[in-house]
Image (tube, helix red, strand yellow):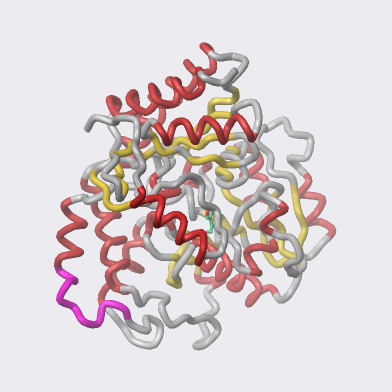
Amino acid sequence: MQIKPIKLTSKSKKIVDKTNRYVVKGTFTYPLVIKSGKSVFIQDVDNNWYLDFNSNVCSANIGYNHPEIAKVLKEYCSSSAHKIAGQDFYSEEQMKMAEKLIKITPSNLTKVFLSNSGAEAMENSIKFAYRKKGPLSGISCTGAFHGRTLGALTYTFSKPVQKKNYPELPHIRINFCTSDSDPKIDDIKDLLAKRKVAFVMTEIVQGEGGYNIASQKFIRNLRETTREYDVPLIIDEVQSGIGRTGKWWAFENYNIKPDIIGSAKSLQIGATISSKEYDPNEAGAVSSTWGGGDRIDLAVGLKMIEVIEKEKLISKASKTGKYILSRLKELENVYPDKVFNARGLGLMLAIDLQSTEIRDKVEERAFRNGLLLLGCGSKSIRIVPPLIINEEEVDMGIRILESAIKKIN
Ligand SMILES: Cc1ncc(COP(=O)(O)O)c(C=O)c1O
């Protein structure tokens, strides 16, 4: 696929303008109106093609129009009960998805609750913990993002705009440590010695907060201390899960077993996966009409996991991630006053630019030249292509990124 500078016509402009007229302001980044996709490329309604370096925010781990997924979608076109009340009635798709999730998680995690989104996956992780521990404070980290529903939002600390005027549950914030020598790395020990809490919750690689990668010692400390005080450790794998970091789950890079995890995005649905100890195990304690009820999304999500296994995309993510990191470090060397802090875990990578304004300009320039990037934190750009990307396609994207960076003055 050749990527050329894009030309937007009145077709995409009309859709963008009408959307802005009728739809509440969300987090729209640039005027991309998606029509279709193929492999690691996306086509807009004006027939421009883009190389996708953000995977719809880590939601398209096997890219677009994969033949196995197309087959699944075809099978469902004649089903007239494709969306059911999934926690009131049974379906084979929910059973298979739950069984698969239990197979790809550590053996202490034995029960699955399905929902619609990442926020719901985390909201229900929080509810599982509260059900057992009672309404105490929950602990999360500076820079965390766990979603925007009110419960999950309490424990989100990535940007003030996400929180203004919204009420909160009782919470305590600890420092998210990216270095083993962070002076606050042992704070959790003092805290849990003094206070009873309902849970500790964290990402392994902070997503919206700026692609900050947790230090090994920090995560080990959280696991050891929560175990010592019988507090559930919840790991948010909404963005980092399903093979992205070179393992099924990012926490596997840290050799720990959480008590509860939340997954979504690439899974197509939300999932809270829990140990027996935190399974509420009481009819009506948690439920949802559409949770576990979108049979197409369930079948697509399941097939996507099978494709990742069949095509060995987890080891590929690890290998390609190393290659991209070396290319990002080259940019850092060539442009030492423009590009900083190249970092990554598997295919979850980022660089920092000088400021928010410059980051946004680079993102916009890359878009105009057919590369889809996405910012995070205050001045970072994340590089999270589909797991199927090859090195030639990586080079194509890095060329466009570099030319956007070069124009910074
Ligand atoms: C780590 C993390 N948790 C939770 C969420 C919320 O997911 P959703 O937007 O599907 O509600 C996100 C979304 O970006 C996320 O990155």
122 left or right of 388 in image: right
> How many discs mark residues in the rendered view?
0
Observer able to see residue 163: yes
268 left or right of 125 in image: left
Q: Foreground residue, 9 or 126?
A: 9
Q: What residue is rendered at 73% in x and 67% in y?
A: 166
Quarter that holds the N terminus: top left
Q: Can you give x and y, in whole percent of width and height, for residue 360 in the image?
A: 56, 36
First to last magenta residue range = 75-83
Q: What residue is rendered at 71% in x and 60% in y?
A: 163
Q: Main secondary structure of the magenta part?
A: loop
Corner quadrant of residue 259: bottom right
Q: Residue furthest right?
A: 194
Asked if residue 95 lies in the magenta stretch, the reply is: no
Residue 304 against residue 323 in the figure, above or below: below
Q: Can you give x and y, in whole percent of width and height, for residue 349 in the image?
A: 48, 34
Q: Can you give x and y, in whole percent of width and height, for residue 172 in the image?
A: 77, 58
Corner quadrant of residue 234: bottom right
Quarter that holds the C terminus: top right
Corner quadrant of residue 399: top left
Q: What residue is rendered at 61% in x and 53% in y?
A: 145
Q: Residue furthest front?
A: 10
Q: Residue furthest top?
A: 334
Q: What residue is rendered at 26% in x and 66% in y?
A: 299
Q: Foreground residue, 128 or 20?
A: 20
Observer able to see residue 111: no
87 left or right of 351 in image: left
